């Protein structure tokens, strides 16, 4: 059963119960009031009848009147006041009555106190109110009764009860109807939440619910939206990561194609073609070159993958790092006419992985060396450390501003042809970035085309 | 006259291998590493029968270069590391004749080159090795100017060897490409045809036996 149906039914039942109890209490009170009013009226009437009758009878009656005269007198007096309700009885004989009931059987006055007797109840299918008293007139006891038919009063009470019940039921029905809509209105956000949750489960991660207000449902909707937001951004992050990995793998396989093509072409030349000794040597040289290029790339890839697992740092002196990077780079730089100028201004220690840091600096130095045209007259590269910052700068061709944002992406090359010709794997700067990130160091670059570039690694 | 092929490829290792291969099977090959330079050179010399273009090139890329080739009616085969379908479709829709992705097999590239040349009516169907000439237009073979009669299978084997001059062709290649895929015969049939070719045309020296593999018609 739906929540709104259950709430409506429950509320309807409670409403019905409360209304019934209230109506019952009211009805009982009204019935008692009406009946006691009727009884009081009947008592007053009977009192007036009895007093008027007995006064008149005593006034006219004389002790030596004959029995028949006295009886006539009594009858006459009583008839004057009896209307159609009075009953006069003497010694069990009904002297005067306009009703078919003997009231003395139902309402006997108290003989000791002289209080009137009152009866109320059904007689012969009718509701009667009977009041009776004893009156003494010249040693004779008369019973003065008043019989009032109050069936209509009871009928009115019954009609009233019926009306009350109808009003109650109508009220409950109306109340339940109203409640149903109110509850439906306040649980509508829940239905929307359900629908939204289904859509999100089906992949519509940007779905949100509207639930204005400050009640629990709105709070739930807000929490729901919050959760959906979290799911969406997580999914986005995962998708982006997936896409990055896909591009990376695509890049890797693409990068391997050219050297592989060269390798297989030359291998098949060596295998199947008639070649001169010189051509044979060339082919072998190309095969070796392609192999070396691929192994360099694999080394860089491995370093990148290993970096993902985190690094261990130890306090190290930047001065020593600079020295090692210089020693390892010198030979390859000298052969290309590049001069490396090293300066260390601060002799402090930094927490770092020395091997990786040397590799980072060598990559930057190599990158700087490639920024010069091969026939440039001077090719200075500056490697410095000061103020917790390593800086590698050159006065080469610089990096165009539109390329600066992408330069650290794997396999991104500003000038594809030249970079590959110079032996660049397209992974050097990506590796630099990954090493800097692993150390928690900030890597920035400043470059002006034609003037040169400076890379900074700030701890 | 030999067919002339324009090769534009910036990777020296691949350019060298392809150029060498083209040269030894009898094509004349002109090489460029820069797309712009290749396009500029067309103004002076555009007598090429075919162009082999890389796509990612310095200067002009292969797609741009294609327009220059079309201006001179030079058919183009792309030869690229871009293996995605979108690039291939673009290349072919733009008007390239064929598209091969690196790494590729040189034999397959030679077949594609020959098909394109044949389709565009540019294939030189006169082949020479030493003093032997095969005129595929007239289905005739000459030895030092004198006509030599060959049986059909012998002719086809010789044509295949001529097309792959200086390259080793295996018995399996000959069986499948000359006899046909369905041929269930033994590789002995190949050896029989080769020896009769050697005898009839005096090619004992030129047709080399490559141990356990096949034969090579040498002419260098």
Image (spheres, rainbow, N blue to C red):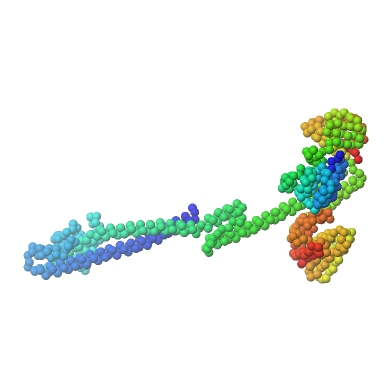
x, y (%) of residue B24? 87, 41
Q: Residue at x 20, y 64 (%)?
A: A132
User: For this rendering, which residue is in front, B117 or B214?
Assistant: B117
x, y (%) of residue A237? 67, 57
A244 vs A70, left or right, is: right
**Residue A262 appears in view:** no
x, y (%) of residue A90? 14, 62
**Residue A233 appears in view:** yes
Query: Which quarter of the figure has residue A398?
Result: bottom right
A211 vs A169, left or right, is: right
Instruction: Judge whether A66 appears above or below A194 on screen.
Output: below
Quadrant for the C terminus of chain A in the image:
bottom right
x, y (%) of residue A374? 86, 58
Question: Residue most toward the front?
Answer: B44
Q: Residue at x 72, y 48 (%)?
A: B86
Q: Residue at x 85, y 38 (%)?
A: B164
User: For this rendering, which residue is in front, B203 or A162?
Assistant: B203
């Amino acid at each position: 059963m739906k929540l709104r149906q259950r709430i409506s039914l429950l509320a309807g039942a409670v409403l019905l119960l409360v209304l019934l109890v209230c109506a019952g209490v009211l009805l009982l009170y009204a019935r008692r009031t009406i009946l006691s009013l009727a009884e009081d009226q009947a008592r007053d009437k009977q009192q007036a009848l009895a007093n008027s009758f007995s006064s008149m009878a005593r006034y006219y009656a004389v002790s030596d009147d004959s029995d028949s005269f006295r009886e006539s007198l009594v009858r006459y007096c009583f008839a004057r006041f009896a209307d159609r309700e009075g009953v006069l009885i003497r010694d069990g004989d009904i002297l005067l009555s306009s009703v078919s009931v003997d009231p003395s059987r139902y309402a006997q006055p108290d003989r000791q106190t002289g209080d009137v007797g009152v009866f109320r109840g059904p007689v012969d299918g009718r509701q009667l109110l009977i009041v009776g008293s004893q009156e003494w007139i010249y040693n004779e006891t008369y019973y003065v009764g008043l019989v009032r038919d109050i069936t209509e009063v009871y009928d009115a009470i019954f009609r009233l009860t019926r009306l009350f019940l109808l009003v109650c039921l109508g009220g409950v029905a109306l109340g339940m109807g109203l409640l149903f809509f109110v509850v439906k209105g306040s649980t509508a956000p829940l239905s929307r939440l359900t629908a939204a949750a289904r859509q999100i489960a089906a992949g519509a991660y940007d779905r949100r619910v509207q639930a204005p207000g400050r009640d629990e449902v709105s709070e739930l909707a807000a929490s729901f939206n919050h959760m959906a937001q979290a799911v969406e951004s997580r999914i986005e992050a995962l998708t982006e990561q997936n896409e990055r990995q896909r591009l990376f793998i695509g890049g890797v396989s693409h990068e391997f194609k050219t050297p592989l093509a060269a390798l297989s072409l030359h291998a098949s030349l060596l295998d199947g073609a008639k070649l001169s000794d010189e051509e044979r040597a060339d082919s072998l040289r190309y095969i070796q070159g392609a192999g070396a290029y691929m192994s360099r790339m694999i080394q860089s890839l491995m370093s990148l993958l290993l970096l993902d697992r985190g690094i261990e740092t130890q306090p190290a002196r930047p001065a020593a790092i600079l020295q090692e990077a210089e020693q390892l780079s010198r030979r390859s730089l000298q052969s290309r006419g590049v001069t490396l100028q090293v300066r260390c201004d601060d002799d402090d220690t930094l927490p770092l992985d020395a091997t990786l840091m040397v590799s980072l600096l060598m990559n930057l130095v190599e990158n700087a060396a490639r920024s010069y045209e091969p026939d440039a007259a001077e090719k200075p590269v500056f490697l410095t450390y000061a103020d917790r910052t390593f800086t590698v700068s050159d006065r080469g061709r610089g990096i165009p501003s539109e390329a600066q944002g992408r330069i650290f992406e794997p396999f991104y090359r500003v000038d594809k042809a030249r970079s590959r010709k110079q032996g660049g794997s397209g992974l050097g700067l990506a590796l630099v970035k990954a090493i800097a990130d692993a150390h928690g160091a900030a890597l920035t670059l400043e470059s002006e085309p034609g003037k040169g570039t400076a890379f900074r690694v700030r701890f | 006259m030999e067919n002339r092929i324009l090769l534009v490829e910036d990777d020296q290792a691949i350019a060298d291998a392809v150029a060498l291969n083209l040269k030894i099977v009898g094509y004349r090959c002109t090489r460029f590493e820069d797309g712009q330079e290749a396009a500029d050179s067309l103004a002076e010399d555009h007598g090429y029968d075919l162009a082999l273009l890389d796509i990612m090139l310095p200067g002009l890329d292969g797609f741009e270069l294609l327009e220059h080739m079309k201006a001179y009616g030079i058919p183009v085969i792309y030869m690229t590391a871009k293996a995605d379908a979108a690039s291939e479709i673009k290349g072919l829709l733009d008007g390239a004749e064929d598209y091969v992705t690196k790494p590729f097999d040189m034999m397959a590239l030679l077949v594609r080159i020959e098909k394109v040349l044949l389709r565009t009516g540019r294939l030189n169907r006169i082949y020479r090795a030493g003093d032997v000439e095969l005129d595929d237009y007239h289905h005739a073979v000459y030895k030092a100017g004198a006509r030599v009669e060959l049986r059909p299978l012998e002719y086809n084997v010789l044509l295949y060897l001529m097309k792959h001059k200086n390259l080793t062709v295996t018995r399996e290649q000959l069986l499948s490409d000359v006899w046909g895929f369905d041929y269930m015969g033994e590789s002995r049939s190949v050896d029989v045809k080769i020896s009769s070719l050697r005898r009839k045309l005096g090619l004992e020296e030129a047709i080399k036996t490559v141990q356990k593999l096949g034969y090579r018609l040498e002419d260098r």
